[in-house]
Image (cartoon, rainbow, N blue to C red):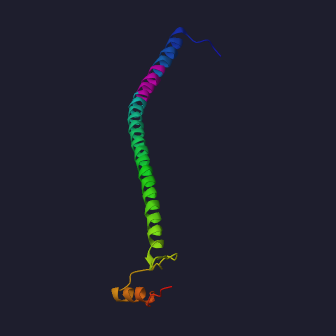
Amino acid sequence: MRPRSPAERIRTLAQAALNADETVDQMDHILDDLEVNLVGLNKAVGTMEASLEYFNQTLHRLNESLEQLESMMGRVQLAAVTQGRRQTAHGQQNAELYPVVALAGPVAPQQLHLQVVERFEVGEPIEH
């Protein structure tokens, strides 16, 4: 390999400097674009955090409402059972609960009336 002349070395160094300068410009553009994207991502994450906080508060309120509803339903069921068992005939307590009619789908009013009536026995009260 022959030694390079000073002019060739300067040309090589100048080309290397131009290449480095172009690389630095490209990196500046990439970093500028990255900064814009990171700012947008930061805003999106902030919005998501606020939405999650609101969602968490909503779930907390829903949980409190469900607890209140469960408490009310327990009191309603207890009142219904207590009232159903305390109906008296001639001073005696009726321990049986009345039959409940459960329907699987829509029923014509006439058919519903027949199903309910068929469950009752009509008789005369007997005194002891």
Question: Does the magenta run of residues contain 23?
Answer: yes
Question: Does the magenta run of residues contain 124?
Answer: no
Occupied quadrant, residue 29? top left
Q: Quadrant of the N terminus?
A: top right
Question: Going 38% across and 85% down the picture, which residue do you hit?
Answer: 112
Q: Which residues are magenta?
A: 20-31
Q: Residue furthest front?
A: 128
Whole-percent x, y for residue 106 in the image: 38, 81
Occupied quadrant, residue 31? top left
Question: Going 43% across and 29% down the picture, which residue do you hit?
Answer: 30
Whole-percent x, y for residue 109 in the image: 34, 85
Q: Residue furthest left?
A: 109
- Residue 69, relative to residue 92: is it above or below? above
> Most prominent secondary structure in the magenta stretch?
helix
- Residue 63, relative to residue 94: is it above or below? above
Whole-percent x, y for residue 10 in the image: 50, 11
Q: Nearer the viewer, residue 87 or 80?
A: 87
Q: Nearer the viewer, residue 40 or 71?
A: 71
